[in-house]
Image (spheres, rainbow, N blue to C red):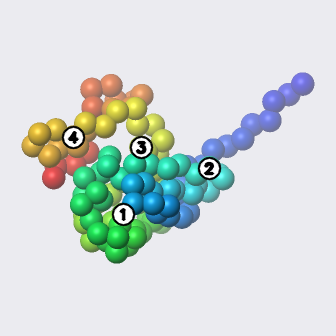
Amino acid sequence: MRANRIKLNPRAIKVDFPDDDSFSVDLADGRTITVPIAWFPRLLMADKKQREHVKIGASGEILRWPDVDEDISVPGLLSTTEIFVLPDGDLRIKNDANINGQLVRKV
């Protein structure tokens, strides 16, 4: 018996805010991921209108909040294993491809 191969497509097609503590991203392959807003200090400090003003990049791989200068990688959300917010405001992520933690943003 042969297994069927399903190509996963981590491109965002829609972003929703089900509550004040998280946002959900619908992906082109049918998955939905829900992420705590607390992972992203700029979104945490943003008001409802600023949070809801999100743009999905043409490729579907970037979520952009222009009002608060926040960009989030959709593939990065799927592969992130740890997030560190350093005392100076730097945000570092750790995933399978980056063991030491990549600097992703200076606040």
Extreme left residue here?
Answer: 88
* Nearer the observer, 70 or 4: 70
Element class at badge 3:
helix
Residue placed under numbered mark 1 in the picture:
64
Residue placed under numbered mark 4 in the picture:
85
Residue 102 visible in the snapshot: no
Element class at badge 4:
strand
Name which residue type carries label 2: Arg
Q: Residue drawn 54% across and 64% down?
A: 14
Which is in the foreground here, disc 3 or disc 2? 2
Which is in the foreground here, disc 4 or disc 1? 4
Residue 48 visible in the snapshot: yes
Distance between mark 1 and mark 3 Cα atoms: 14 Å
Q: Residue drawn 32% across and 46% down?
A: 39
Instruction: Please state if 97 lies on the left or on the right of 24 as rendered.
Output: left
Residue placed under numbered mark 3 in the picture:
76
- Image quarter of residue 3: top right
Q: Residue drawn 27% across and 32% down?
A: 101
Distance between mark 4 and mark 2 Cα atoms: 28 Å
Decide which of tag 1 and tag 2 comes sooner along the chain.
2
* Residue count near mark 1 (Cα–Cα under 10 Å), binned few <14, some 14–19, many ≥20: some
Contact between marks 1 and 2 (CB within 8 A): the answer is no
Residue placed under numbered mark 2 in the picture:
31
Question: Residue 43, percent across and down?
Answer: 30, 59
Name which residue type carries label 1: Arg
* Nearer the observer, 8 or 34: 34
Contact between marks 1 and 3 (CB within 8 A): the answer is no
